[in-house]
Image: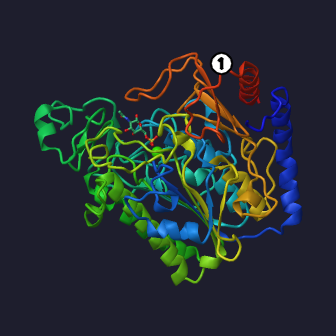
Amino acid sequence: VPALCVPALCVAALLACCQARLASQAQAAETRAAETPNVIVIMADDLGYGDLSCYGATELSTPNIDALAENGLRFTQGYCSASTCTPTRFSFLTGMYAFRQPGAGIAPPNATALVKPGTETIASIMKRAGYATGVVGKWHLGLGEGDAPDWNGELKPGPLEIGFDYCYLLPTTNDRVPSVYVENHRVDGLDPADPLWVGNKRPSPDHPVGSDPEVRKTLKMDWSHGHNNTVHNGIGRIGFYTGGNAARWRDEDLADKWVEKSVQWIEQNQSKPFFLFFASHDLHVPRMPHERFQGKTKLGYRGDSIIQLDWCVGELTKTLDRLGIRDNTMILFCSDNGPVLDDGYEDGAITKLGSHQPSGIYRGGKYSIYEGGTRTPLIAHWPGTIKPSTSDKIVCTVDFAASMAALTGQELADSACPDSFNVLPALLGQDDAKGRDHLLQQPNKGPTLALRIGDWKVLSYENAKPMKHLTYEKGPGKYELYHLADDPSETKNLADQEPERLKEMLAALEKIKAD
Ligand code: NG6
Ligand code: CA
């Protein structure tokens, strides 16, 4: 029999919990002197709960990430806040659930800046605490303002207007155009004589697109759905672009570039505390790891991309060792959403899967509000401060902002980071630590939402349009209720058996939506 919270108390408990946010923050500031270790947040892309050997994978081995887990705190109930990229990243930065922000779903190629200047972010918090702040890798939160980013001019506002001192970016995703790097406010290496154009329509009849049957035959990786617009590096993309040839990257080189730029930036900033958001594109499609990683696993390029990600982590930790700053650096390793096999390319992820379980025992993956969508690897590592262990406390990437504010002794205004909880004691593995007692989960943009309170979880598909190509989402107007401790794989829908609890959980969800 599950440990029941009396249904009628759920909403009250939730309210009490929300009210406790500020109190616990103040308390943390009182009991802990502010500390300023370096902080590196490593966010993987589309990495599932079961994708690492330290989370049970047996078909591949991730020694560098495993070392973080062995010498740090490995969470079994660590979450990202959404099961797609843009909303999770939005919430990680702002400490606000993405469903509250119109337009915070998966950002298109020409998206403008989603996080407005003046918004408190984890970066602005760290900057105020005296940190050097940098972001390297996938951004996917829009750049610039007006109708579209000014790809040939200043890409402003962007990370530098919301708290970062430095950025070196994949501006959108590796499957979205334009396939260039952005350094601070400019496309890196852009030749003004060869301007960049980005748009929604084929710019000319002879422009090579993946949907053209003749062009399709020449692709080095075929598409399975979408991804049939502009061809770059032998791969069809989402969206169209021309020009900027000198500035274009090769998919195979992205990971090396993230490491190169991060190592440089860490070296330059090693004497002050620094905050680095290392936003890997691995293992997002098109999965095209560097040649030296191709074929390293039996799982095809999806597995090989995990090995490449693990290599990146190893390069970062080696750098900290070389500079003698490992013990003074907190690493938070996480993912932006759960796993997906076919996300639009024929890369062997399904045919070569074998017995590998990308979501572990959890149901669903990317785009889903079942656990597989958001319950993802989460590791906190800080030698000498965080004792090696595992933790079943509930923590989420949306909590990093308030937790880092608590770590560095920064006060947050009442309106700042409204959904971010100070879970620092849980991240540090302190004995009396509590994680979250409730957590909201979303797939992309609303209105489908899930709410976990303790071990109970309600899924609300109110007015949902199930996403294409996915079989596990339910139709509109449906509710599901699961008890995660008894049924972690969400197989027994108790909605009909527990009508009162369902009602209370839905009321609690409405309350959070209205906050
Ligand atoms: C989807 C893309 C998918 C991926 C996703 C964003 C198609 C058919 N599917 O629309 O390939 O790009 O958006 O992924 O185009 S995320 O991890 O950045 O959220
Ligand atoms: Ca993702």
Name the colour scheme: rainbow
**Residue 306 on image: x %, y %:** 39, 58
Quadrant including the C terminus: top right
Quadrant in which ligand 1 is drawn = top left
Task: Provide the secondary structure element on which disc 1 rests.
Answer: loop
Left or right, 39 with respect to 444, comes to right
What residue do we see at 35% from left, 55% from top?
Answer: 303
Q: Nearer the viewer, residue 397 or 387?
A: 387
**Which residue carries the number 1 mark?**
496
Q: Which quadrant of the structure image shows residue 441?
A: top right
> Could you tell me if residue 191 is visible in this image?
no
What residue do we see at 25% from left, 61% from top?
Answer: 295
Q: Which quadrant of the structure image shows residue 512?
A: top right
Quadrant including the N terminus: top right
Above-or-below relation of 464 to 238: above
Left or right, 148 with respect to 19, comes to left
**Residue 235 on image: x %, y %:** 24, 45
Above-or-below relation of 253 to 286: below
Left or right, 156 with respect to 381, comes to left
